[in-house]
């Protein structure tokens, strides 16, 4: 059974800082890994999807990396803004389904 | 258009009621999903439909009954629920295949009294 761990559970930073969120998973037999953000009481918004054959994926200020063999992914956020405050979830996908980590709750202070 | 819609937004029901949640997408996706999310917890997969057929049931109690009447629509029928079933129910869709992104709806907030 896939187990997903996200570290840290919570993070508070001043505006403008660069930061890294970590995701580790136990079963490396995945075909992709997706990063989402979730605002309180809302649905999930897809940020990035990395296929198992890729090492990284970039979108704007976001960069996600994947090391499938070691079961790790990171999400790098550059020049953080208060609007980035949300919970960030990683979800490796395999065998037709995704498994979510508990998330990292990010607060960016003005 | 990358929108998944869910109705209703909020639902309050008694333990003897029968109600249904509805999810719709018009992106031509052939995979649709139901997730359950408790407060401060990650989403947990309940069901997956592929080409309108149930492909994954994560040992969900029979008081939850999914239905996929066509490729754009996914329902979740609720009957004789328990208070512990109160949660945010999320629907998602994707193309089939290993490269495909899941798109989520805003969810239905369910309260069982």
Image (cartoon, grey):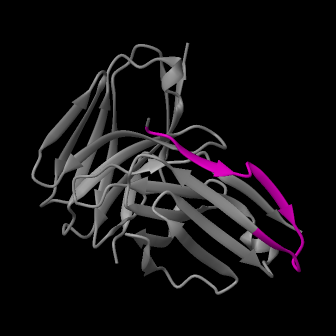
Magenta segment: B2-19
Q: Quadrant of residue A16?
A: top left
Q: Residue visible at 15% across and 59% down?
A: A70
Left/right of residue B101 with respect to residue A84 in the rendered view:
left
Left/right of residue B103 with respect to residue A59 in the rendered view:
right
Residue nearest the viewer, comparing B23 with B62: B23
Residue A66 in the image: above or below residue B112:
above
Image coords of residue A38 (percent x, y): 53, 41
Q: Quadrant of residue B31?
A: bottom left
Q: Residue visible at 49% across and 57% down?
A: B72
Left/right of residue B36 with respect to residue A84 in the rendered view:
right
Whether the magenta-drawn stretch holds residue B53 is answered as no
Image coords of residue A5 (percent x, y): 38, 58
Residue B70 in the image: above or below residue A67:
below
| Quadrant of the rendering where the N terminus of chain B is positioned | top left
In the current view of this chain or complex, which residue is farthest to the front? B70
Left/right of residue A19 with respect to residue A15 in the rendered view:
left
Whether the magenta-drawn stretch holds residue B12 is answered as yes
């Amino acid at each position: 059974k896939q187990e997903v761990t996200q570290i840290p559970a919570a993070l508070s930073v001043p505006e403008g800082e660069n930061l890294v969120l970590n995701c580790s998973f136990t079963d490396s037999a995945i075909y992709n890994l997706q990063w989402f953000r979730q605002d309180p009481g809302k649905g999930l918004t897809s940020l990035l999807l990395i296929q198992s054959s890729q090492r990284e994926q970039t979108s704007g200020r976001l960069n996600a990396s994947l090391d499938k063999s070691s079961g790790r992914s990171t999400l790098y956020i550059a020049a953080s803004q208060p609007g980035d405050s949300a919970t960030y979830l990683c979800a490796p996908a395999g065998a037709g389904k995704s498994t979510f980590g508990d998330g990292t709750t990010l607060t960016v202070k003005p | 258009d990358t929108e998944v819609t869910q109705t209703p937004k909020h639902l309050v029901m008694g333990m003897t009621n029968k109600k249904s949640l509805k999810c719709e997408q018009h992106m031509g996706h052939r995979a649709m999903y139901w997730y359950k999310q408790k407060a401060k917890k990650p989403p947990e997969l309940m069901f997956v439909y592929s080409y309108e057929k149930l492909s994954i049931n994560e040992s969900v109690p029979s008081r939850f009954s999914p239905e996929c009447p066509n490729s754009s629509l996914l329902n979740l029928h609720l009957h004789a629920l328990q208070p512990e079933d109160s949660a945010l129910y999320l629907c998602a869709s994707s193309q089939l295949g290993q490269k495909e992104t899941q798109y989520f709806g805003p969810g239905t907030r369910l309260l069982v009294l």
